[in-house]
Amino acid sequence: MYQHSDLLSEICDFLYPRSPYYGQFKPEYLAFNAHLQDFSRRVNYICSLQTGGKLSPEQAYKQIHVLWKQLKSAKKQL
């Protein structure tokens, strides 16, 4: 069981990498950084799917546009 959970942890770290935050510490800065990292990860997935032929350029653009709006909304809420 222990090896199985190590494998899941490694897969999670690979799929959802997190970078440490080095800026001035304020809760809203930290929250925005988390949103920004999530945005970056999702855009990377969309770009990979488009490059691999799984998404059309139009679909990729629309999905990234929606993510951008969500990021702007998250920034405004902070």
Image: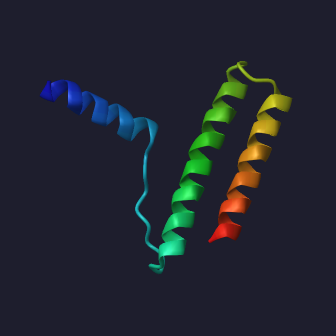
Residue 62 x, y percent position in the rendering = 82, 38
Choose between 66 and 77: the one closer to the eye: 77
- In this view, the residue in front, 44 or 66, is 66
Quarter placement of the N terminus: top left
Indicate the quadrant where residue 8 lies: top left
Residue 5 coordinates in the image, percent (x, y) = 22, 30
In the rendered view, how is the structure colored?
Answer: rainbow
Give the x, y percent position of residue 74: 66, 61
For image coordinates 22% across by 32% down, the residue present is 6
Q: Nearer the viewer, residue 29 or 52?
A: 29
**Total numbered circles:** 0
Q: Is residue 69 left or right of residue 8?
A: right
- Judge left or right: residue 60 versus residue 13: right
Horizontal and vertical percent position of residue 73: 72, 61
Query: Image point 73% across, 19% down: which residue?
Result: 53
Residue extending furthest toward the top: 53
Q: Is residue 19 above or below residue 43?
A: below
Name which residue lies at 36% across and 31% down: 11
